Image (cartoon, rainbow, N blue to C red):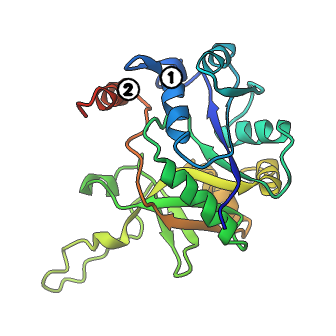
């Protein structure tokens, strides 16, 4: 069964590390347009940008995209997605996929995969994805979120710390890290609209506040997050000037 779903792309102007990020030029097009066009390669029935900025609204309309103006006080992109989803008049069981506005290299096949995972896993409240690490340094990098899942493919925990922790046994060859057990979390999420409203209506929980990872709120309340192995992983998101320069090179064919 093919999932019918809507993609909502949260995009705020006031990024701390890269102000005006959605409107930054990436080889002739604003970043938000690059992300929107990447998502257009998926099977989404509808793609909507959710933003608090009139300049982003104009930019999206200029390239023919659909956009929803939201409040400016949201603490997270998920809150912004929830407001936009409710305003679109979607059914309670409709699937909403959250793709961050700074992901210009998001594979359409991955968007489809995460949506399909949720429709096939009725016991899960949320679906997301993971992949292998790009290099050894990412295991200890707090900006790279790691995830551990159970044998049924449901998340046990997410952390910025190295998980699962590798403890060498002291036996010959034990210093070799079993990298196949380490999974990098990819920040794409699928929800049913009804659960998205429940999730954003809950206060943050202690692990979420410590790790600065809002998906831990789902686990804290005993709900399940289905995790799939990505068929195709996205390139790095754009958080800094250096990331932006790298993305420009990619779209110029040099990356």
Drawn side of residue 173 relative to residue 4, left or right:
left
Residue 67: percent from left, percent from top: 70, 27
Nearer to us in this view, 194 or 181: 194
- Examine the rendering and report whether any part of residue 219 can be seen: no
Drawn side of residue 23 relative to residue 6, left or right:
left
Image quadrant containing the C terminus: top left
Nearer to us in this view, 41 or 59: 41
- Examine the rendering and report whether any part of residue 94 can be seen: yes
Q: Which mark is residue 21?
A: 1
Where 143 falls versus 37 (above or below)?
below
Drawn side of residue 210 relative to residue 171, left or right:
right
Direction left: furthest residue: 172
Residue 49: percent from left, percent from top: 66, 31
Tell me the crowding category of disc 1: few under 14, some 14 to 19, or many 20 or more residues within 10 angstroms, Cα based: many
Q: According to the image, label 2 marks what residue? A: 244
SS state under label 1:
helix
Image quadrant containing the N terminus: bottom right
Determine the CA span between mark 1 and mark 2.
Answer: 9 Å
């Amino acid at each position: 069964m093919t999932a019918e779903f809507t993609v909502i792309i949260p995009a705020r102007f006031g990024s701390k590390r890269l102000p005006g990020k959605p409107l930054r030029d990436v080889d002739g097009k604003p970043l938000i347009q690059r992300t929107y066009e990447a998502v257009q390669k998926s099977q989404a029935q509808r793609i909507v940008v959710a933003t608090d900025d009139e300049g982003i609204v104009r930019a999206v309309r200029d390239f023919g995209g659909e956009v929803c103006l939201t409040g400016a006080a949201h603490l997270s992109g998920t809150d912004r997605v929830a407001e936009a989803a409710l305003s679109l008049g979607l059914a309670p069981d409709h699937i909403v996929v959250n793709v961050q506005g700074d992901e210009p290299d998001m594979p359409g096949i991955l968007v489809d995969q995460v949506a399909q995972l949720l429709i096939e896993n009725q016991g899960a409240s949320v679906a997301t994805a993971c992949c292998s690490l790009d290099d050894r340094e990412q295991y200890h990098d707090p900006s790279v979120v790691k995830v551990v899942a159970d044998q049924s493919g449901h998340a046990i925990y997410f952390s910025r710390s190295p998980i699962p922790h590798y403890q060498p046994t002291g036996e010959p060859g034990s210093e070799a890290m079993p990298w196949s057990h380490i999974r990098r979390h990819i920040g794409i999420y699928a929800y049913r609209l009804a659960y998205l409203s429940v999730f954003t209506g809950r206060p943050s929980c202690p692990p979420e506040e410590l790790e600065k990872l809002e998906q831990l709120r789902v686990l804290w309340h005993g709900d399940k997050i289905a995790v799939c192995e990505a068929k195709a992983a996205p390139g790095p998101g754009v958080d800094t000037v250096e990331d932006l320069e790298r993305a420009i090179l990619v779209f110029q064919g040099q990356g």
